[in-house]
Amino acid sequence: MNLPPWVRPALTRLRRELPRLRRPLLRLRRDLLFLASGLPLHAVTAALFFWVYTLLLDVLGPGTEAATLTLPIPVTLLVVAGYGLTEAQRWRFRTWCGADLPRQGRRNAKRQFGYHWLIGPLFGVLEALVLALLAAGLVAGTCLLWIWTLGWEWRVSHHGYSTQAAYISLAGLAVLAVVPALAAGVTRLELLVGRAVLGVSRSEQLLRRVEDLTESRAGAVDAADAERRRIERDLHDGAQQRLVALALNLGLAKATLTDLPPEARQVIDEAHREAKEAIEELGNLVRGLHPAVLDELGLDAALSGLAARAPLPVRLRTDLPERATPAVEGVAYFVVSEALNNVAKYADATRADVTVTRLGEILRVVIADDGVGGADPAGGSGLKGLAQRVRSVDGAFRISSPVGGPTIVTVELPCTP
C-alpha cells in the first residue's frame, strides 16, 4: 500500500509515544477508580448523619413517636460504620494505591470515627467534584459530535450553533486537561491522610520497631549461644578426643619403647608434654566458650568449677532458688570468667569474691577483688566487651575501681524470657 511520505514518520513517532502515553493513562485510570470507589463509602456516613439530623429535628420539634423509636437505628449504624468502613478503606487503599494499612479492629476508635465521620464526608465532596468535572468535560468536549444526533430542524432553527458548540468543546477539553492533575492531587491527599489517621502512628511505629529489634536481638543472642554450644561439642567430641588419643599413644610409646636412642626418647617426651598442654589449653577454651556443666548442672556448679580453677583464691557465694534462661546463665558465666581472668592478669590481687543472687526477676552478679584498682572501661576492649555482652540481654553493667582498689564489678541481668 502506497502511503504519503509524511505518514510513515508520523506513524513511527506515534509508536514511540504510545508507551509514554500509556503510563499517564494507567495512572489516571487508577486515580479515577480510587476516587469512584471512595465516593459511596464516604457518602454512607453523610447519609447517616443527614438521617440522624432530620430525626433529631423531628424529636426536638413535634416529637413524634416514630422519630423517637427510629433514632437509635442510624446512631447504631454510624457506630458500626466507624469500624466496618475501615476494612473497606483498607481494601480500597491496598487495591488502587498499593498501600497496606494495618488492621485496626477496635484499636484507635477515635481516629477511625474521626476519619469516617469528619474527614470522609469532606473527601466525598472532593471526589464528587472531580468526577462531576470529568463528566462535564466529556459531555462538553464531545459537543460537536453528539449535537449532530439532533434533528436537522433544530440545526436549521438555531443559527450559529456550530460556533457555540466549538467554544463549549474547547472549554470541555480544557476541563479534561485539568482533571488528571486534580484526581492525582486528591488521591495523594487521601493517601497521606489515610496513612496518618488509619495507619500506624509515629509512637506505634517506634514501639513496633523496638519490639522487632528486641526480638531480632534476642534471636541473634540465642543463635550465637547455640553456635558456641555447637563449637564446644565439636571441639570436645572431635579435636579434644583426637589429642587425648594422641597423648595416650605417646605415653604408651614412652613406656614401652625403652630401647630407643636418647634423642628419640627426648622427642617423644616433648611431644607427650605438648599434647597434654594442648589438651589442657583446649579444655580451657571449651569451658570458656560454653561449659557442658552449665547446661547439665546449672550456673552454681559451673561457677564452682571456675572458682576452683582460678589462679587465686576465690570465695563464691550463690543464692539461686531457680534457674534463669540459658542465654542469661551463659552471660553470667562469661562475665565471671572474664572478670577473674582480668583480676589474675592486671589487678595484682590476693583474693576475689564472687556473689551471685537472684532477686525476683533479676540475676545480680558482683565480682570484687583487693587489687590495685584503676580499671577503666574506656582504656581497653576487655571491659567494653563485658559491657556489650551484658547489654545484649538488656542487662546493666557497672564498675567501681578507684586507684588503690578495691575493684567491684556489678552486673544485673533480667531473667524474664
Image (cartoon, helix red, strand yellow):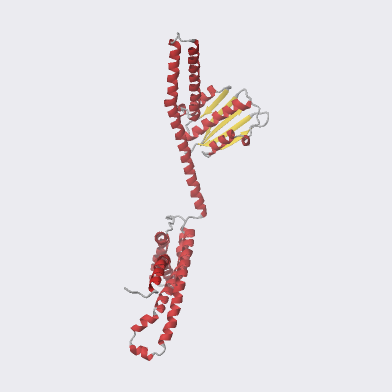
Residue 137 higher or lower than 415, as above or below:
below
| Residue at x-position 49% and y-position 45% | 213
| Image quadrant where residue 70 sits | bottom left
Judge by depth and name the residue closer to the eye, 59 or 132.
132
Which quadrant holds the N terminus? Answer: bottom left
Q: Is residue 279 visible?
A: yes
**Rendered location of residue 49, percent (x, y):** 43, 68
Residue 32 in sight: no
Residue located at (68% from left, 28% from top) = 404
Residue 57 place in picture, x, y as percent: 45, 72
Closer to the camera in the image, 72 or 97: 97
Q: Measuring 50% from the left and 16% from the top, which residue is drawn there?
A: 270
Left or right: where 107 falls relative to 410: left
Residue at figure coordinates x 57%, y 22% from the top left? 311
- Residue 294 x, y percent position in the rendering: 47, 28
Foreground residue among 131 and 230: 230
Q: Nearer the viewer, residue 275 or 142?
A: 275
Percent across and percent down for residue 126 are 46, 70
